[in-house]
Amino acid sequence: MTAITPKAPDHANLPPLASRFVNVNDMSWEESKLYPGVETKTLIVDPATGLLTMLMRMRPGAKLPDHEHVLIEQTYVLQGSLVCAEGECKAGDFVWRPAGSRHEAWAGPEGNLIIGMFQLPNRFFKANGAVEDFLGNDWQQKWGKALEQQEQAQFS
């Protein structure tokens, strides 16, 4: 198994099929170095497939710039709201976006706390032409193989 919860050292010695219980309250928020006002807690990531679930909180007006949801993305808003040109998703609401959808998103006036579930991390488009993941890694180099494997699985 390649899926992990970063910062959960007690998981390292568990048998392959054991459940991974995550004490989210004990995890520290990680401030984004690229997107001011955005903090995350990665609950699970699988570097081989790109599967990713994270808690994200955004201060009022914090913005996620131009990005593409490579595969289906799902977001449940726990507090506040998440806004884009298509509408506003408020606390208790859920939005999912099809593969290939592209937009900017920002926190509403109260900020937000959301849980995001991704089949593959987003592509962020930079003004200089670079395409990166949320952490600033070259998207193709980091996730291209995972996308290729998922595309091949669709046609097998």
Image: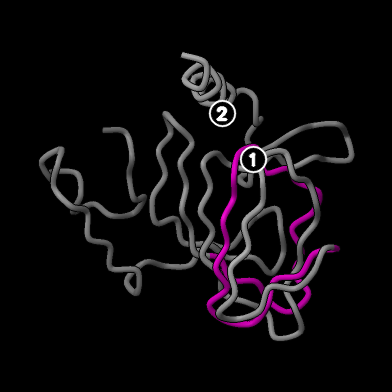
Q: Quadrant of residue 131?
A: top right
82 versus 105 height, above or below: below
Q: Main secondary structure of the magenta part?
A: strand
Say which of 94 and 20 sits in front.
94
67 versus 47 height, above or below: below
Say which residue label 1 marks: 133
92 versus 29 height, above or below: below
Residue at disc 1, secondary structure: loop
Say which of 45 and 94 sits in front.
94
Which dot marks residue 143? 2
How many angstroms separate mark 1 from mark 2 (CA)?
9 Å
For the record, the magenta segment spans: 56-85
For image coordinates 63% across by 35% down, the residue present is: 137
First in residue order: circle 1 vs circle 2: 1
For image coordinates 59% across by 23% down, the residue present is: 144
Task: Say few, some or many: other residues with alpha carbon within 10 Å of mark 2 (under 14 / 14 to 19 / 20 or more).
Answer: many
Q: Is residue 117 left or right of residue 70?
A: left
Q: Quadrant of residue 68?
A: top right
Amino acid bearing label 2: Trp
Q: Position of residue 69 (x, y in %)?
A: 67, 44
Furthest residue in direction front, as rendered: 155
Q: Quadrant of residue 141?
A: top right
Say which of 36 and 74 sits in front.
74
Q: Are marks 1 and 2 in contact (CB under 8 Å)?
A: yes
For image coordinates 80% across by 40% down, the residue present is: 125
